[in-house]
């Protein structure tokens, strides 16, 4: 979970601001590209971890999967081309998306977060 807080969330929040929260004239394509590169490296580490056990929490779904899986809906919505070679990561995300709690609480509309 610390990996999520210290490593995943900073570039995710930065990219979310570049793609969603900022007005188009305030956005920086160069900054967004740099954040995507950083996120690709982060996602590669997650993909490698998933290769060992299938879940980030270990052999079973657990708290680390919830904590790191939570931003995945928005991340892959705003940057669908991230981590194209990370099959385990995409499989993990697909398994998360099948869970009723994900569908109810995570995969929600966030259009109200866009600037007016």
Image (cartoon, grey):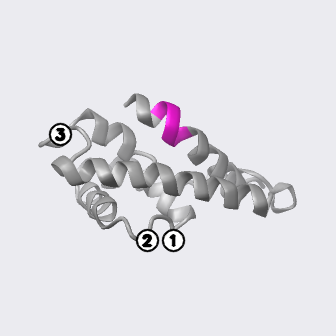
Mark 3 → mark 2, Cα distance in angstroms: 23 Å
Label 3 or label 2, whichever comes before in sequence order: 3
Q: Secondary structure at mark 1?
A: loop
**From the viewer's perspective, is residue 91 above or below residue 31?**
below
Q: Residue at x 28, y 61 (%)?
A: 88
Mark 1 → mark 3, Cα distance in angstroms: 27 Å
Camera-near label (2 vs 1) is 2
Residue 5 image position (x, y, % from top left): 48, 32
Provide the residue designation for mark 3: 58
* 56 and 97: which is toward the camera: 56
Sort mark 1 into few (<14), some (14-19) or many (20+) by Cα contacts within 10 Å.
Answer: few
- Circles 1, 3 touching at the beta carbon (< 8 Å): no
Circle count: 3
Q: Which residues are magenta?
A: 5-9
Sort mark 2 into few (<14), some (14-19) or many (20+) by Cα contacts within 10 Å.
Answer: few
Examine the structure image and report whether residue 6 is included in the region drawn in magenta: yes
Q: Which quarter of the rendered picture does the N terminus lie within?
A: top left
Mark 2 → mark 1, Cα distance in angstroms: 6 Å
Q: Secondary structure at mark 2?
A: loop
- Circles 2, 1 touching at the beta carbon (< 8 Å): yes
Q: Residue at x 50, y 65 (%)?
A: 82
Q: Secondary structure at mark 3?
A: loop
Kindly give the residue lying farthest to the right in the view shown: 25
Q: Which quarter of the rendered picture does the C terminus lie within?
A: bottom right
Examine the structure image and report whether residue 68 is included in the region drawn in magenta: no
Residue 60 image position (x, y, % from top left): 13, 42
Residue 81 numbered tag? 1
Provide the residue designation for mark 2: 84
């Amino acid at each position: 979970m610390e990996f999520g807080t210290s490593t995943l969330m900073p570039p995710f929040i930065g990219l979310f601001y570049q793609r969603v929260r900022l007005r188009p004239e305030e956005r920086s394509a160069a900054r967004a590209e740099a954040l995507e590169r950083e996120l690709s490296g982060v996602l590669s580490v997650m993909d490698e971890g998933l290769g060992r056990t299938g879940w980030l929490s270990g052999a079973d779904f657990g708290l680390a999967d919830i904590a790191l899986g939570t931003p995945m809906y928005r991340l892959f919505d705003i940057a669908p081309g991230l981590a194209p070679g990370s099959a385990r990561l995409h499989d993990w995300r697909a398994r998360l998306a099948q869970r009723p709690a994900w569908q109810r609480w995570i995969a929600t509309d966030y259009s109200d977060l866009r600037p007016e």
